[in-house]
Amino acid sequence: MPSAQELIKDAEIARFLETHQGAADAIQRAARELANKPDAQAALKKLLPALSSKIVKVFFSYKTKDAPAAQVVVSVLRESSADKLEITYQGEFTQEIAGRQWREQIRDGVRRANWFILLLPDPSDELDWCLYETGLFEAQLTSADRLICLHHPDSAIPSPIEGYHAVAATIPEMEKFLRMVYLEEGPIPGLPPINRSIDHRIPELAGRIVEAIRAPKRKLQRDVFEPWIELRLEEAGALKSKEGLDSATIVEANKEALDLFGFRQLKGTFGELRSTIVEGQGDGRWREELFHVIRKIAQGRTFNPIQAVFQSPDGKIYRPVALAVDRSGQDGPVQTYHLTFAEEVTASDTSVIPTELSMLGTLLRFTFRFRWEVLERFAKGPLSADDIERLEINLTRITVDWESRGAMDEADIPKLFAGTQAARLQEMTTAWYRLRNREKTGELDIAIEQKDGEKIPKLLAGILPLNQEFLEMAADRFAEMVGDPKR
């Protein structure tokens, strides 16, 4: 193996030194680093242009479908290189270069490269062209060159390139790679670090590259057992009413969803799909709740699960469920919404029950729930912070269920009773509103907000006699209505 001095005296290298005196120090350093390598002479000759320009030549190889990720990686490498990385990649070849000229530019870029970087998010696809470019580089590979493979951590490296410097798209691995690129001495033999000043930015740059190298597409068939649809809706965060949902495009729907709505073929919009659902006058609470949920999702807000239900053409009852969304990146805008429809086997079909009887039955159900889910449980104090939290959860559950399935206008409730009973009901309602109301200004609202474990049970205990009185009054009235043959 030639010594450093013998390398410098090589005729070709000596002539280059004579005409590039500014690169003398870099060439001598490179000669010392390569002196113990079996290919030292070839390696140093290949390095000469880079040592003169003090620019590392890089060829970036990728598959066409990975072009967006490649563009991000190249952009990140360039912006922090202080113009000391000259990166060649197919995305910047001009449209005029085609056929033979295009291949010649590929060959020229590969042969001049000191580094060859292969982007491989998913090796399951065909690699013919990437392996062709890799083969070109390997054919003139020297000990001064670097061959690097950037890949998704879940992707196995194909056997033809498994011996390369593999960098998994994880933050620790990518930070290590970027420190090698920018901070280490000798990015190529003879040159100083590319840009030591960006040490503090390494985590940020690593994160951008990791995010760009997307998870490999797995060729799996997904079977959704519930009725399922995928919606695309522009500007969902600006929706004004439930009617705005009708313009949402149906991207996909499974057979179960088409059967639910009574169709054999996919419909274009949500409005067309739901057209088979018969709604009574002023009814449509399931769409009202769905509208609010989708708008909140688009605005990045939290939401309560949908409770309202609807009846399908075959008589079954379903509840919409906001299952998932597809986004552009981790925090990007929502692209599509995934909805399923869960069959509600416990929901009542009130369409065949006389209206007033159905209303009174609903009132009794909620009054019983309030008695045993709230009053019997929390009217004895004092309450702990955990007790108050459970109370809020129970009140919210009952409130949401009432608003979704109450099936009545609250102004119509007194009409179920006559004379003194109607007047008494109004007094009970007024007393309750003094404790809790929509504006959250009632005594109970304030006590809950202040986490007053002493006052809350006293207020609830005061409601117990009213609850008992109403249950007896409503039960008697229910018995009258059931026994009335005119109803």
Image (tube, helix red, strand yellow):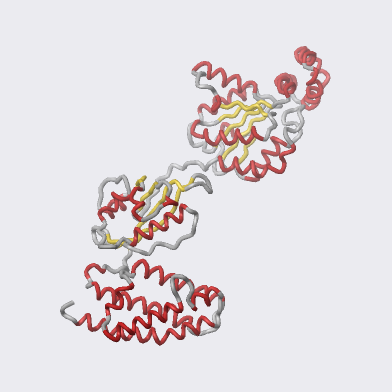
Percent x, y of residue 138:
62, 25
The N terminus appears in which quarter of the rendering?
top right
Judging depth in this view, the residue of 146 and 234 nearest the camera is 234
Percent x, y of residue 173:
65, 43
Single out the residue that lies furthest toward the left.
486
Judging depth in this view, the residue of 48 and 4 nearest the camera is 48
> Where on the picture, by quarter, is residue 109?
top right
How many marks do you count on the picture? Answer: 0
Single out the residue that lies furthest toward the right.
5
**Left-right relation of 398 to 6:** left
Percent x, y of residue 388:
52, 76
* Relative vertical location of residue 484 with respect to residue 276 in this rendering, above or below: below
**Left-right relation of 349 to 184:** left
- Residue found at x 30% / y 78%: 414
* Relative vertical location of residue 387 with respect to residue 246 in this rendering, above or below: below
Percent x, y of residue 471:
34, 83
The C terminus appears in which quarter of the rendering?
bottom left
> Where on the picture, by quarter, is residue 449?
bottom right
Judging depth in this view, the residue of 275 and 184 nearest the camera is 275
**Left-right relation of 9 to 410:** right
* Relative vertical location of residue 327 with respect to residue 474 in this rendering, above or below: above
